[in-house]
Image (cartoon, rainbow, N blue to C red):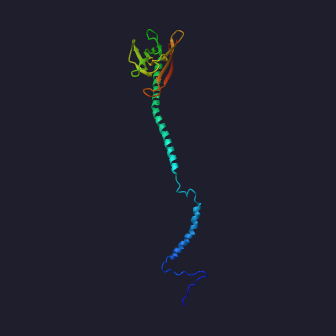
């Protein structure tokens, strides 16, 4: 009289497994895995080739080439830095030498333009290296670019001496390290002072040429000379 379970056609009821009750659940898991596998394969096909190349790297040859190029480039950069380090003090000293000579030359020519009298025998006769003048305000100065240098015998100095009562006082160095003075030992050095006169024979214009070493105080620096030119029109004498 008990009711029996109905079994559909083509399907056999699976009796429970008394040994492994979870066998039914494992079959369900296998079915689920079979369902998800095609989806995973589809997603894998959509990935880019770069994404699948996670194990790509550099070959030993490539590393050696890059290391060699790096050594060459760093060597060139260091060599350039060393050259720059050597040139910087020379260029700095050259700039100082130019500036010092410009300042001294300006101070000298500024007072020469105020010259009111340079007649002899009251004044020493003008030469290629010296000029003795009296300014309009009555002050008298002797500009002498043949003074010896205290440390380098091949150099001269341009020194301004105040003259009071015919006696020279303590001089002021205007330009240090003059190359075109008599101490240079050159057979025909460029004169520091050259003169032009008017019809009456009075000096009315003075050309000033100064040569100084580009290396300044350095023992090893630029070996060329720096040449500065200026001109002085003595308007107080051209009357």
Residue at horizontal 47 percent and vertical 34 percent from the top:
83
8 in relation to 175, above or below: below
Residue 164 x, y percent position in the rendering: 39, 14
| Closer to us: 103 or 35 | 35
Residue at horizontal 58 percent and vertical 63 percent from the top:
43
Residue 168 x, y percent position in the rendering: 39, 14
Quadrant of image for the N terminus: bottom right
Residue at horizontal 51 percent and vertical 20 percent from the top:
230
183 in relation to 80, above or below: above
Which residue in the rendered view is the most extreme toward the right?
A: 9
Q: How many marks?
A: 0
Residue 209 x, y percent position in the rendering: 49, 19
Residue at horizontal 49 percent and vertical 43 percent from the top:
71
Residue 146 x, y percent position in the rendering: 43, 17
| Closer to us: 92 or 119 | 92
Which residue in the rendered view is the most extreme toward the bottom?
A: 1
């Amino acid at each position: 009289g008990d009711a029996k379970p109905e079994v559909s056609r083509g399907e056999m009821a699976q009796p429970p497994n008394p040994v492994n009750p979870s066998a039914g659940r494992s079959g369900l898991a296998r079915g689920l895995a079979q369902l998800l596998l095609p989806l995973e394969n589809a997603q894998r096909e959509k990935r880019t080739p770069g994404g699948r190349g996670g194990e790509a790297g550099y070959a030993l040859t490539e590393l050696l080439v890059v290391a060699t190029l790096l050594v060459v480039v760093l060597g060139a950069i260091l060599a350039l830095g060393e050259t720059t380090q050597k040139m910087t003090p020379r260029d700095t000293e050259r700039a100082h030498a130019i500036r010092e000579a410009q300042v001294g030359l300006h101070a000298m020519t500024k007072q020469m333009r105020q010259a009111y009298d340079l007649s002899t025998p009251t004044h020493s006769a003008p030469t290629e290296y010296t000029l003795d003048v009296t300014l309009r305000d009555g002050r008298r100065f002797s500009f002498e670019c043949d003074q010896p240098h205290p440390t380098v015998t091949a150099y001269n100095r341009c020194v301004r001496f105040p003259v009071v009562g015919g006696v020279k006082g303590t001089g002021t160095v205007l330009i240090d390290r003059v190359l075109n003075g008599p101490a240079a030992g050159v057979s025909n050095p460029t004169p520091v002072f050259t003169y032009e006169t008017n019809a009456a024979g009075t000096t009315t214009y003075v050309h000033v040429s100064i040569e100084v070493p580009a290396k300044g105080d350095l023992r090893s620096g630029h070996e060329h000379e720096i040449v500065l030119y200026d001109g002085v029109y003595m308007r107080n004498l051209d009357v």
